[in-house]
Amino acid sequence: LAKTTQPISMDSYEGQEVNITCSHNNIATNDYITWYQQFPSQGPRFIIQGYKTKVTNEVASLFIPADRKSSTLSLPRVSLSDTAVYYCLVGGDNQGGKLIFGQGTELSVKP
Amino acid sequence: DGGITQSPKYLFRKEGQNVTLSCEQNLNHDAMYWYRQDPGQGLRLIYYSQIVNDFQKGDIAEGYSVSREKKESFPLTVTSAQKNPTAFYLCASSIVAGEYEQYFGPGTRLTVT
């Protein structure tokens, strides 16, 4: 499973766009990039998944450059309720569903 | 409403006692998982099950046991052999094994003294 590196923490203010970058230099050809969000004392929640270029849903956008060695989760116009830990995961469906969570990025949104 | 339920939310036990954590899902998912989370850390996989009557060890299975007698249920027993059982335990499921979109329950916080 590819190792991921992301900032330990980030601060932002309400209404700003937040971009969290994840490095995954050893990503394999069949690996997907998946992001989860976790609030304190709750289970993680799937946010978005992508393979290349750009993916957008109602919550976030995921930007993946052509070399796929990094990815950026973009949260538009964050609010206080977006304060959470965000995890970047990389892997393929041949790993039995094993998710490897690193320490994640603790995002703090201030008023 | 479909989802995953874990009970209880908080659990307290004395050292040396076995304790079983409940996990039930009504999503009709084939695969189920147990994770452990320690303060400030990511999740670590304890056990997972791809189908009924089958399960495999994850990265930190020592001191834990599971069963999968029904598709909906995947209970986890924390035995007295687990050296540091105090943690936040999360159960998850996915449509099939290998899916990176997993649905998590609310978790059980176990404290052993």
Image (cartoon, grey):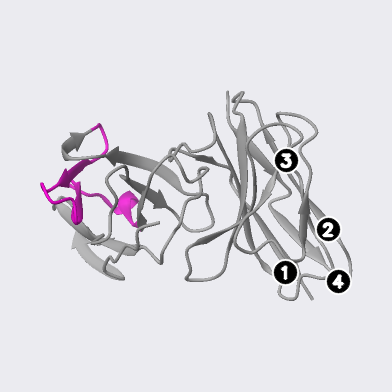
Q: Say which residue label 2 marks.
A: B19
How much space separates mark 4 and mark 1, taking CA atoms? 11 Å
Q: Earlier in the sequence, mark 1 or mark 3?
A: 3
Res B14 label: 4
Pinpoint the chain carrying mark 1: B
User: Going by the picture, which residue comes out furthest to the left?
Assistant: A66
Q: Quadrant of residue A11?
A: bottom left
Nearest to viewer (mark 4 / mark 1): 1
User: Is B27 placed left or right of B101 in the picture?
Assistant: right
| Residue B62 locus on image (x, y percent) | 73, 66
Quick check: marks 3 and 4 in contact, CB under 8 Å? Answer: no
Q: Residues within 10 Å of mark 4 (few under 14, many from 20)?
A: few
Pinpoint the chain carrying mark 4: B
User: Going by the picture, which residue comes out furthest to the right?
Assistant: B17
| Helix, strand or loop under label 4 | loop
What amino acid is labelled 3 in the image?
Answer: Phe
Closest to the observer, A5 or B85: A5
| Residue A58 locus on image (x, y percent) | 25, 32
Name which residue lies at 15% across and 50% down. Answer: A15
Q: Residues within 10 Å of mark 1 (few under 14, many from 20)?
A: many
How much space separates mark 1 and mark 3, taking CA atoms? 18 Å
Q: Say which residue label 1 marks.
A: B85
Q: Are marks 4 and 1 on the same chain?
A: yes
Q: Earlier in the sequence, mark 3 or mark 4?
A: 4
Q: Earlier in the sequence, mark 4 or mark 2?
A: 4
Q: Quadrant of residue B71?
A: top right
How much space separates mark 3 and mark 2, taking CA atoms? 14 Å
Res B74 label: 3
Quick check: marks 2 and 1 in contact, CB under 8 Å? Answer: yes
Which range of residues does the magenta coloring cover? A57-84
